[in-house]
Amino acid sequence: MLFYFRYMKKQIILLLILIIGLDSFSQVSTSQIAKDKKMDWWREARFGMFIHWGVYAVPAGNYHGFQQKKGGAEWIMNRMKIPVSEYQGYAKEFNPVKFNADEWVKMAKDAGMKYIVITAKHHDGFAMFKSGASKWNIVDATPYGKDILKQLAAACKKQGIKLGFYYSQAQDWNNPGGAAARKLMAEGWPNPDSSLVDAFTKANSGHWDPLQTKATMAKYIDNVAVQQVKELLTNYGDVAVLWWDTPTNMTDEFAGKLDSLLKLQPEIITNDRLKRPNYPGDFKTPEQKIPNLSELDGKDWETCMTMNKTWGFNSNDHNWKSSETLIRNLIDITSKGGNYLLNIGPKADGEFPQESIERLKEIGSWMKINAEAIYGTHASGLKPVSWGRFTQKENGQNSTLYVSIFNWPSDKKLRIEGLTNEIQTTSLLSNGQKLKSIRSADILTIDLPENATDKIATVIKLEIKGKLENIVSTEYKKKMKTGELD
């Protein structure tokens, strides 16, 4: 009898463990389903516009005749150790009368972008919106006197573009108590008191002006950051993204206060920069780089990148990426399952730099023909090749593979290794022209026209029988794992 009771006790314990395990699995599964639903639009979009704009557009990388050569122009206050009172004087010159929200949103939309993320507040603490938490904002501190975000929110809603806000939750060089990165004075900046300023900076956790230390960071979080994030999530309709940046001196307690505000926008998604590692957000944010396949871990990610070298407008930065580079970046990122957040740094008068406008138009021209190879596509399971990239999507029980060709083969034959399923149709995406393809063992050879239809990237569309996970051969997958394809 004793043996029986011990046996039953063990069975009951095992049953309870099983029930608890199933419940935990169910909760994880439900949570993942909810996240997937929330992320659907973002994964479909693949392409967005980043906007870095604030009073730093007034000095535009220049201070007392010195040109800022390192770091983004939006960092000029920190890099030059500009006193708070002097920097605030730039707000009196910030009067963006040429700003037109409808035009900005239309340029983004025409370029094929599906969402916009703008700096609601960068590290200089200047709010681009009306704020009751600090008078250091565009309505109260500038001759312009209007809420930029209100106008942008209305234009995005009208044109069907998602709107997100960048918010510097920790670094704030104007509102007392905000954190400051411990960067020394810009190299070559001829400040006669540079050694004293750097000494003060080292001794005061990155601050260089006593006005910055007039409050604790705890008070800054409670009185400025929490209040402003609450304003952003309350006063501008649906907010698609909250893009935190630089968790300098952040604690889990501070992060928890900000994170709890997200309930005001249940469908909002966030990045991974609130406070690492306990607040991972919904997506990772490689900056100014495109990850290699070996760096990816299956999590959602978004590369943010400038068109030239700087985020904020710098009148001295003429090192612009070509439209070819930007378009191929978009294809490369999409082929690896990521999003591309491409930055614009508007001028102080509210206009986009002409170089940015030209590139947006050229990207838009390519997207008008080839967007099908970008929106809603996923990584293909095929390794990037020297001549191009692959994206794919499911089409019912079948799959569509998009082959973006950067370098047109001299023999007019495109060879793709690894596809195992039946190819139903092969055609040019631009005009639907059917192409001949022949399979030999594990190699598909496509006969191409004499010339590329697009010198930047010509897209071939393959309709393939079978679902995504089954179209790449087992042998090819083995080669991927062993590095034979590197």
Image (spheres, helix red, strand yellow):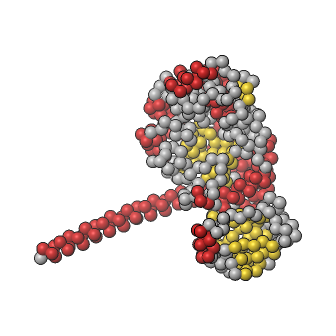
Question: Which quadrant of the rendered structure holds the N terminus?
Answer: bottom left
- Up the image or down, 482 lies above or below 248; here it is below
* Picture layout, residue 443 above or below residue 221: below
The answer to which image quadrant residue 27 occupies is bottom left
In the current view of this chain or complex, which residue is farthest to the top? 192
Asked if residue 148 can be seen in this view, the reply is yes
x 75%, y 24%: residue: 65
Judge from the rendering whether residue 459 lies leftward or rightward of residue 474; answer left or right. Answer: right
Query: In the image, what residue occupies the spot 59% across and 54% down?
Result: 301
Residue furthest toward the right? 450
Measuring 82% from the left and 68% from the top, which residue is drawn there? Answer: 409
Residue 15 rendering spot, x and y as whole percentages: 28, 70
Residue 145 appears in the figure: no
Which quadrant holds residue 139? top right
**Residue 76 percent location from the top left of the image:** 66, 30
Q: How many marks?
A: 0
Please state the horizontal and vertical placement of residue 397, each as a whole percent of the image.
61, 76
Quadrant (top left, top right, bottom left, bottom right) of the C terminus: bottom right
Which quadrant would residue 448 be assigned to in this image?
Answer: bottom right
x then y, percent, for residue 170 = 52, 36
Q: Residue at x 51, y 43 (%)?
A: 274
Residue 7 falls left or right of residue 365: left
Q: Against 138, is 152 above or below?
A: below
